[in-house]
Amino acid sequence: MSADAGHFIRGWLITTLLITAMVVSVNAAIDPYLLFNMPRVRWFNDRKPGFEHQERLMKAYEVVRAAPNGLILGTSRVAIGLDPAHAAWPAKARPVYNLGVVDADPFTSFRYLQHVLAHRDVAVVVLGLDFEDFLVGQRRDPSAPLPYESYLSVDRDGRPAPDRRWHYLRDLTESTLSLEALADSVATVRASMRGETLDVTASGTLSEAGFRREMAELGAPALFTGRSSNCAGRAGFSSSSSRSRCTPTCSRRSICSEPGRPTRPGSESWSR
Protein backbone atom coordinates (compact mmCIF):
# COMPACT_ATOMS: atom_id res chain seq x y z
CA MET A 1 0.00 0.00 0.00
CA SER A 2 1.40 3.39 -0.98
CA ALA A 3 1.88 6.22 1.52
CA ASP A 4 -0.81 8.32 -0.21
CA ALA A 5 -3.33 5.48 0.04
CA GLY A 6 -2.53 5.03 3.72
CA HIS A 7 -3.02 8.74 4.41
CA PHE A 8 -6.35 8.69 2.54
CA ILE A 9 -7.66 5.69 4.48
CA ARG A 10 -6.63 7.17 7.83
CA GLY A 11 -8.20 10.49 6.91
CA TRP A 12 -11.37 8.77 5.77
CA LEU A 13 -11.61 6.74 8.98
CA ILE A 14 -11.02 9.78 11.19
CA THR A 15 -13.61 11.82 9.29
CA THR A 16 -16.15 8.99 9.50
CA LEU A 17 -15.60 8.58 13.24
CA LEU A 18 -15.92 12.33 13.83
CA ILE A 19 -19.15 12.56 11.83
CA THR A 20 -20.57 9.51 13.61
CA ALA A 21 -19.64 10.94 17.01
CA MET A 22 -21.23 14.26 16.08
CA VAL A 23 -24.49 12.60 14.96
CA VAL A 24 -24.66 10.48 18.12
CA SER A 25 -23.96 13.52 20.32
CA VAL A 26 -26.58 15.66 18.61
CA ASN A 27 -29.28 12.97 18.78
CA ALA A 28 -28.48 12.14 22.40
CA ALA A 29 -28.50 15.80 23.46
CA ILE A 30 -31.75 16.64 21.66
CA ASP A 31 -33.27 13.27 22.63
CA PRO A 32 -36.17 13.28 20.15
CA TYR A 33 -37.59 9.98 21.44
CA LEU A 34 -37.10 10.52 25.20
CA LEU A 35 -34.76 7.56 25.52
CA PHE A 36 -31.99 9.38 27.39
CA ASN A 37 -34.06 11.48 29.79
CA MET A 38 -32.26 14.65 28.75
CA PRO A 39 -33.56 17.93 30.21
CA ARG A 40 -36.22 19.57 28.06
CA VAL A 41 -34.91 23.06 27.36
CA ARG A 42 -37.19 25.75 25.99
CA TRP A 43 -36.46 26.82 22.40
CA PHE A 44 -34.17 23.79 22.02
CA ASN A 45 -35.76 20.40 22.68
CA ASP A 46 -38.84 20.94 24.86
CA ARG A 47 -41.24 19.86 22.07
CA LYS A 48 -41.24 16.24 20.89
CA PRO A 49 -42.97 15.98 17.48
CA GLY A 50 -41.33 12.58 16.96
CA PHE A 51 -44.10 11.01 19.03
CA GLU A 52 -46.29 11.10 15.91
CA HIS A 53 -44.51 8.00 14.63
CA GLN A 54 -42.57 6.76 17.70
CA GLU A 55 -45.17 7.15 20.42
CA ARG A 56 -45.20 3.51 21.50
CA LEU A 57 -41.41 3.43 21.78
CA MET A 58 -41.30 6.71 23.71
CA LYS A 59 -44.00 5.86 26.21
CA ALA A 60 -42.59 2.40 26.92
CA TYR A 61 -39.42 4.03 28.27
CA GLU A 62 -40.91 7.19 29.72
CA VAL A 63 -43.54 5.46 31.85
CA VAL A 64 -40.87 3.43 33.64
CA ARG A 65 -38.90 6.57 34.49
CA ALA A 66 -42.08 8.35 35.63
CA ALA A 67 -42.66 5.63 38.29
CA PRO A 68 -46.41 6.33 38.46
CA ASN A 69 -48.85 5.22 41.11
CA GLY A 70 -51.75 5.84 38.73
CA LEU A 71 -52.15 4.92 35.07
CA ILE A 72 -54.45 6.07 32.28
CA LEU A 73 -54.83 3.51 29.47
CA GLY A 74 -56.70 3.70 26.20
CA THR A 75 -56.61 5.44 22.83
CA SER A 76 -55.82 8.99 21.79
CA ARG A 77 -59.13 10.04 23.33
CA VAL A 78 -57.76 9.53 26.83
CA ALA A 79 -54.24 10.53 25.81
CA ILE A 80 -55.58 13.98 24.94
CA GLY A 81 -58.72 14.20 27.05
CA LEU A 82 -57.68 13.04 30.54
CA ASP A 83 -55.31 15.22 32.53
CA PRO A 84 -52.93 13.26 34.79
CA ALA A 85 -52.20 16.45 36.74
CA HIS A 86 -55.84 17.21 37.59
CA ALA A 87 -56.57 17.90 41.26
CA ALA A 88 -59.32 15.24 41.33
CA TRP A 89 -56.85 12.38 41.33
CA PRO A 90 -56.57 10.81 44.80
CA ALA A 91 -53.27 11.15 46.60
CA LYS A 92 -52.58 7.42 46.39
CA ALA A 93 -52.69 7.60 42.58
CA ARG A 94 -50.13 10.38 42.20
CA PRO A 95 -48.05 10.76 40.19
CA VAL A 96 -50.33 9.72 37.35
CA TYR A 97 -49.01 8.85 33.90
CA ASN A 98 -51.14 9.01 30.78
CA LEU A 99 -50.32 5.82 28.89
CA GLY A 100 -53.03 6.32 26.31
CA VAL A 101 -51.72 5.36 22.87
CA VAL A 102 -53.06 6.37 19.48
CA ASP A 103 -55.11 3.56 17.91
CA ALA A 104 -54.65 1.26 20.91
CA ASP A 105 -57.05 -1.64 21.36
CA PRO A 106 -57.71 -3.28 24.75
CA PHE A 107 -54.97 -5.85 24.15
CA THR A 108 -52.42 -3.06 23.58
CA SER A 109 -53.48 -1.43 26.85
CA PHE A 110 -53.16 -4.79 28.60
CA ARG A 111 -49.64 -5.34 27.26
CA TYR A 112 -48.50 -1.89 28.39
CA LEU A 113 -50.04 -2.50 31.81
CA GLN A 114 -48.03 -5.72 32.03
CA HIS A 115 -44.93 -3.72 31.13
CA VAL A 116 -45.51 -1.24 33.94
CA LEU A 117 -46.38 -3.88 36.53
CA ALA A 118 -43.10 -5.65 35.74
CA HIS A 119 -41.35 -2.60 37.22
CA ARG A 120 -43.70 -1.42 40.00
CA ASP A 121 -47.17 -1.75 41.47
CA VAL A 122 -49.80 0.87 40.74
CA ALA A 123 -52.70 1.92 42.93
CA VAL A 124 -55.18 3.18 40.34
CA VAL A 125 -55.75 2.23 36.69
CA VAL A 126 -58.25 4.04 34.46
CA LEU A 127 -59.01 2.26 31.18
CA GLY A 128 -60.78 4.01 28.32
CA LEU A 129 -62.74 1.69 26.02
CA ASP A 130 -64.12 2.58 22.59
CA PHE A 131 -67.37 1.15 21.24
CA GLU A 132 -65.79 0.02 17.98
CA ASP A 133 -63.29 -2.15 19.88
CA PHE A 134 -66.14 -4.60 20.42
CA LEU A 135 -67.50 -4.66 16.89
CA VAL A 136 -66.94 -7.82 14.87
CA GLY A 137 -64.41 -7.00 12.20
CA GLN A 138 -60.84 -7.74 11.27
CA ARG A 139 -59.04 -10.35 13.31
CA ARG A 140 -55.35 -10.93 13.78
CA ASP A 141 -53.34 -14.03 14.48
CA PRO A 142 -53.17 -14.16 18.31
CA SER A 143 -49.79 -15.89 18.20
CA ALA A 144 -48.14 -13.33 15.92
CA PRO A 145 -45.91 -10.83 17.76
CA LEU A 146 -46.79 -7.17 17.36
CA PRO A 147 -44.06 -4.62 16.54
CA TYR A 148 -44.46 -2.59 19.73
CA GLU A 149 -44.02 -5.67 21.94
CA SER A 150 -40.27 -5.51 21.42
CA TYR A 151 -40.32 -2.32 23.53
CA LEU A 152 -41.88 -4.09 26.51
CA SER A 153 -40.11 -5.74 29.42
CA VAL A 154 -42.25 -8.88 29.62
CA ASP A 155 -43.87 -11.35 27.25
CA ARG A 156 -47.60 -12.06 27.12
CA ASP A 157 -47.34 -14.48 30.05
CA GLY A 158 -45.67 -11.84 32.22
CA ARG A 159 -42.22 -13.42 32.03
CA PRO A 160 -39.11 -11.30 31.30
CA ALA A 161 -38.80 -10.82 27.55
CA PRO A 162 -35.88 -13.04 26.46
CA ASP A 163 -34.58 -10.67 23.76
CA ARG A 164 -35.16 -7.44 25.66
CA ARG A 165 -31.44 -6.62 26.03
CA TRP A 166 -30.87 -6.79 22.29
CA HIS A 167 -34.02 -4.82 21.59
CA TYR A 168 -32.80 -2.15 24.00
CA LEU A 169 -29.47 -1.93 22.15
CA ARG A 170 -31.38 -1.71 18.88
CA ASP A 171 -33.52 1.12 20.24
CA LEU A 172 -30.42 3.02 21.37
CA THR A 173 -28.72 2.51 18.03
CA GLU A 174 -31.71 3.58 15.98
CA SER A 175 -32.22 6.61 18.22
CA THR A 176 -28.66 7.86 17.83
CA LEU A 177 -27.16 6.58 14.58
CA SER A 178 -30.07 6.60 12.14
CA LEU A 179 -30.81 9.35 9.66
CA GLU A 180 -34.44 9.23 10.76
CA ALA A 181 -33.39 10.11 14.31
CA LEU A 182 -31.24 12.95 13.00
CA ALA A 183 -34.18 14.27 10.96
CA ASP A 184 -36.40 14.06 14.05
CA SER A 185 -33.75 15.89 16.08
CA VAL A 186 -33.86 18.73 13.56
CA ALA A 187 -37.67 18.65 13.66
CA THR A 188 -37.53 18.77 17.47
CA VAL A 189 -35.44 21.96 17.46
CA ARG A 190 -37.66 23.57 14.83
CA ALA A 191 -40.83 22.62 16.71
CA SER A 192 -39.39 23.91 19.99
CA MET A 193 -38.72 27.26 18.36
CA ARG A 194 -42.24 27.46 16.90
CA GLY A 195 -44.07 26.56 20.11
CA GLU A 196 -47.51 25.30 19.06
CA THR A 197 -46.82 21.92 17.51
CA LEU A 198 -47.14 18.19 18.07
CA ASP A 199 -45.89 17.27 21.52
CA VAL A 200 -46.13 14.86 24.43
CA THR A 201 -45.71 16.06 28.00
CA ALA A 202 -43.57 14.46 30.68
CA SER A 203 -46.74 12.89 32.12
CA GLY A 204 -47.74 11.37 28.77
CA THR A 205 -50.48 13.77 27.65
CA LEU A 206 -50.65 14.36 23.89
CA SER A 207 -51.13 17.82 22.45
CA GLU A 208 -54.09 18.72 20.24
CA ALA A 209 -51.86 20.34 17.63
CA GLY A 210 -52.14 17.40 15.22
CA PHE A 211 -55.92 17.56 15.11
CA ARG A 212 -55.93 21.33 14.85
CA ARG A 213 -53.50 21.17 11.94
CA GLU A 214 -55.57 18.61 10.10
CA MET A 215 -58.79 20.48 10.73
CA ALA A 216 -57.21 23.57 9.21
CA GLU A 217 -55.72 21.74 6.23
CA LEU A 218 -58.46 19.21 5.43
CA GLY A 219 -61.61 20.57 6.99
CA ALA A 220 -64.20 18.82 9.13
CA PRO A 221 -65.98 16.92 6.30
CA ALA A 222 -62.84 15.04 5.24
CA LEU A 223 -61.94 14.20 8.84
CA PHE A 224 -65.39 12.84 9.66
CA THR A 225 -65.65 10.95 6.37
CA GLY A 226 -62.29 9.32 7.02
CA ARG A 227 -63.36 8.50 10.56
CA SER A 228 -66.57 6.84 9.32
CA SER A 229 -64.64 4.79 6.76
CA ASN A 230 -62.20 3.71 9.46
CA CYS A 231 -64.95 2.48 11.77
CA ALA A 232 -66.82 0.73 8.96
CA GLY A 233 -63.65 -1.08 7.94
CA ARG A 234 -62.93 -2.17 11.51
CA ALA A 235 -66.48 -3.50 11.88
CA GLY A 236 -66.40 -5.37 8.58
CA PHE A 237 -69.42 -3.48 7.24
CA SER A 238 -67.92 -2.99 3.81
CA SER A 239 -66.25 -5.29 1.33
CA SER A 240 -63.62 -2.62 0.93
CA SER A 241 -62.47 -3.04 4.54
CA SER A 242 -59.60 -5.25 3.40
CA ARG A 243 -58.32 -2.46 1.19
CA SER A 244 -57.04 0.97 2.09
CA ARG A 245 -59.49 2.85 4.30
CA CYS A 246 -59.16 6.17 2.48
CA THR A 247 -61.51 8.73 1.13
CA PRO A 248 -60.78 9.80 -2.46
CA THR A 249 -59.85 13.31 -1.38
CA CYS A 250 -57.73 12.67 1.68
CA SER A 251 -53.99 13.05 1.47
CA ARG A 252 -52.68 12.77 5.03
CA ARG A 253 -51.69 9.55 6.76
CA SER A 254 -53.90 10.49 9.70
CA ILE A 255 -56.90 9.51 7.61
CA CYS A 256 -55.38 7.23 4.97
CA SER A 257 -53.95 4.05 6.40
CA GLU A 258 -54.11 0.41 5.58
CA PRO A 259 -55.46 -1.83 8.33
CA GLY A 260 -52.72 -2.67 10.79
CA ARG A 261 -50.02 -1.05 8.67
CA PRO A 262 -48.59 2.26 9.94
CA THR A 263 -47.01 4.53 7.39
CA ARG A 264 -43.72 4.67 9.32
CA PRO A 265 -42.17 2.25 11.83
CA GLY A 266 -43.91 2.52 15.18
CA SER A 267 -46.59 4.87 13.88
CA GLU A 268 -50.34 4.50 13.97
CA SER A 269 -53.24 6.20 12.28
CA TRP A 270 -54.50 9.43 13.82
CA SER A 271 -58.02 8.47 12.84
CA ARG A 272 -58.66 6.95 16.27
Image: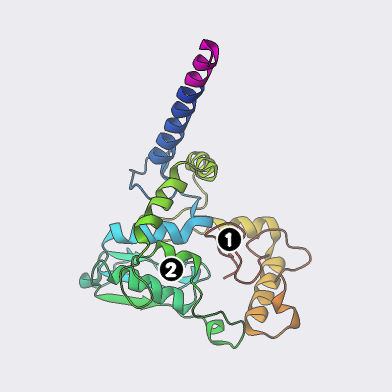
Q: Is residue 75 left or right of residue 249?
A: left
Q: CA distance from mark 1 to mark 2?
A: 16 Å
Secondary structure under badge 2?
Answer: loop
- 224 or 259, nearer to the observer: 259
The label shown at residue 211 is 1
Q: Tell me residue 261's x, y (percent).
A: 61, 66
What amino acid does circle 1 point to? Phe
The crowding category of the residue bearing disc 2, from other C-alpha atoms within 10 Å (few below 14, some 14 to 19, many at least 20), is many
Q: Is residue 54 left or right of residue 218?
A: left
Secondary structure under badge 1?
Answer: helix
Q: Is residue 95 left or right of residue 171?
A: left
Residue ID for mark 2: 100
- 153 or 104, nearer to the observer: 153
Residue lying at 27% horizontally and 65% vertically, measured from the top left = 68
- Give the magenta-colored segment's residue range: 1-11
Q: Earlier in the sequence, mark 1 or mark 2?
A: 2
Q: Tell me residue 162's x, y (percent).
A: 35, 65
Indicate whether residue 120 is drawn in magenta: no
Q: How many numbered tags mark residues here? A: 2
What amino acid does circle 2 point to? Gly
Q: Tell me residue 106's x, y (percent).
A: 46, 79
